Every structure is written in C-alpha cells, then in structure tokens.
Amino acid sequence: MAELQMSDAAAKLKKIDFCMLHTNNEAGVFSVRPMSNNGDVEYDGDSYFFSYVDTQKVSDIERNTRVGLTFTAPPSLLGKPGIFLAIAGTASLTRDKSQFETHWVKELERWFPEGIDTAGIVLIKVSATEIQYWDGEDNGRIPLAKL
C-alpha cells in the first residue's frame, strides 16, 4: 500500500470524534485524558480543543508545550482493524474570541453554557510535528509538508 498523505489522515480524522490528549504533568509523567474535536477536522496538521483554563491539562501545557494525541477508528464492517494515529505536537493556548468563533460548534454549549463568552474558557491548538499510523496492515509516518 502507498504511504498515507496528509489528505488521507484528514479523511480518516473526519470520522473520529474523540482522541486522547497526552501532556506532561509536574512530575514529568504523562497525564492522559479524552478530548473531543467536535467535528472540527478540516485537518491540516492542527487540532483544536476547548477547555477551561483552570484544568490540569492547561497547567501542564503552560509548563511544557510538547503533547501527543492518539486517535483510533473502529474496525470496518468487514473486520479490518480501524486506523490508529499517533500525533506528536506542540500545544498553544489562546483566549482570542475570534478564534473561538472559528472553531465553535453549538454542541459545545453542553460544557460551556455561555458559549464563547463562558468565563475561563480557552482554546488549545495542537500543531503536529510528527504523525505515525498503523491500519492493521501498514504503518508509517505521514509527511508534514507545512513544517
């Protein structure tokens, strides 16, 4: 099979809502939690997640911007394993409401009841530095042309 490209990863990620966000806690140990991309997956190497600023993940990112994301797609109806994507990247935090608007979906009001005006909200951006994959048959790295 040919090596996956960024457009292939984007098509796969469009179908996966949740991932695991890996940060480094104050002891230097991975701290992992589920995050939803809320369908915001016009993937170009950047992923976006909303959070409250007073969380451990935000404290971890403020201390060390190196993070990881792991995505898993379920098996196909024919039994072939789904794809596994491991993304290493750099996280940044923004409180810019224009960026909130760009990445906001109505379903987020479940966690952020005042929308983009919710007190203490922050947007986490993860910019990929490396993407690895395994699809049950092939594995490899996806070239990151923009980096």
Image (cartoon, rainbow, N blue to C red):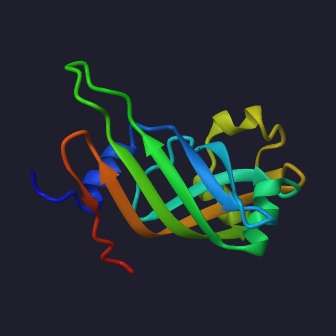
Is 68 on the left-hand or right-hand side of 15? Answer: right
Please determine whether, in this image, residue 90 is positioned above or below residue 75: below
Residue 131 percent across, percent down from the top left: 38, 62
Q: Give the residue drawn at x 39%, y 50%.
A: 85
Instruction: Answer with the quarter of the image where residue 16 lies.
Output: top left
Of all residues, the one furthest to the left in this rendering is: 1
The percent coordinates of residue 90 (x first, y second) are 57, 72
**Side of 31 where 145 appears, left or right:** left
Name the one closer to the observer, 15 or 23: 23
At 49% across and 65% down in the image, what residue appears? 88
Q: Nearer the viewer, residue 64 or 39?
A: 64
Quarter holding residue 144: bottom left
Q: Name the side, left or right, on which 79 lies relative to 95.
A: left
Q: Residue at x 77, y 44 (%)?
A: 115
The reply, left or right, for residue 141 in relation to residue 124 is left
The residue lying toward the viewer, choosing from 95 and 138, is 138
Q: Nearer the viewer, residue 30 or 55?
A: 30
Res. 19 image quadrant: top right
Give x and y (percent) for residue 136: 25, 39
